[in-house]
Image: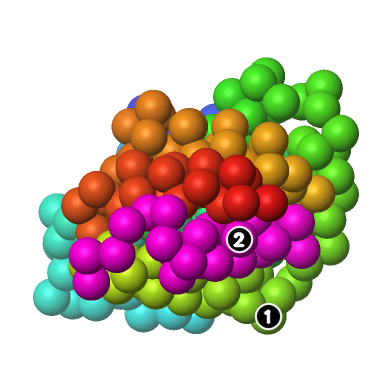
Amino acid sequence: MSWSAGQLAKLAGVTVRTLHHYDAIGLLSPSERTRAGYRRYGAGDAERLHRILVYRELGFDLARIAVILDDPDADALSHLRCQHALLEEEVRRLNGMIRGVEALMKAKKTGVNLTPGEMREVFGSFEPGKYAEEAEQRWGNTDAYRESQRRASKYDRKQWLEIRAAAERINRELAAVMASGAAADSAAAMDLAEQHRQHISRWFYECTSEIHIGLGSMYVADPRFAQTYDTIAPGLSGYLRDAIIANAERA
């Protein structure tokens, strides 16, 4: 079986001009010509064109492709193995890009305006966009949610790192107070609960004592929040809730 330049171009999804160019540079010369001098491409030519197009898709320039294809020690199977490995690598790269875009899409729902790399630096394995739809369904109609979205959209990497560092410090100090044996209604624990409330008010929305008590209850009732605190120190979620309640009563 053989094809004219037009037929092969149509099958391969390229232009006739491309085939003529490949012929001119010696990358793909037709194995036959008609008496009138027209190009005819055989099965071997079509297979070589396929390899060329795969390598082109992978970003190789024509000169590099020519060297690869004309390697006397490489047979058709070697080329296929090479292309297979390169395609798998490309799939991994594209999957990484897809995950990055998905992370940005989720982050946009939360108002977080960071690149995927900055997201990993600031939040680690936690994905702020993972529960974005749930948060919007539960609190989307509240002023606190809207204010949080508005503020979060303006923060850069440096500010998010500052937010994280402050929250981690409060949690560490609260865990230390709990470990010392001090009660949740001790002055030290209540002071840290107040810092926790002020941290939310400073960076996200005005956190009243009433709202703070609701958050404290959620930290215990929702296993996802409980795990976040209890990973720092077993029982910390309940201790924080009790300190929040005591602090609200003190106020």
State the separation of the CA atoms marked 2 and 1: 24 Å
Locate residue 163 relative to residue 153 in the image: left or right.
left
Instruction: Please provide percent x and percent y for residue 212.
Output: 62, 42
Magenta span: 180-202
Task: Give the quarter of the figure containing the N terminus.
Answer: top left
Tag of residue 158: 1
Residue most toward the top?
137
Identify which residue is drawn at 82% across, 27% down: 142
Q: Which residue is mark 2?
A: 194
Q: Earlier in the sequence, mark 2 or mark 1?
A: 1
Proximity of marks 2 and 1: CB atoms separated by less than 8 Å: no
Mark 1, Cα crowd under 10 Å, few <14 / some 14-19 / many 20+, is: few
User: In front of the other: label 2 or label 1?
Assistant: 2
Identify which residue is drawn at 20% across, 52% down: 234
Q: Secondary structure at mark 1?
A: helix
Tag of residue 69: none
Identify which residue is drawn at 45% across, 70% down: 188
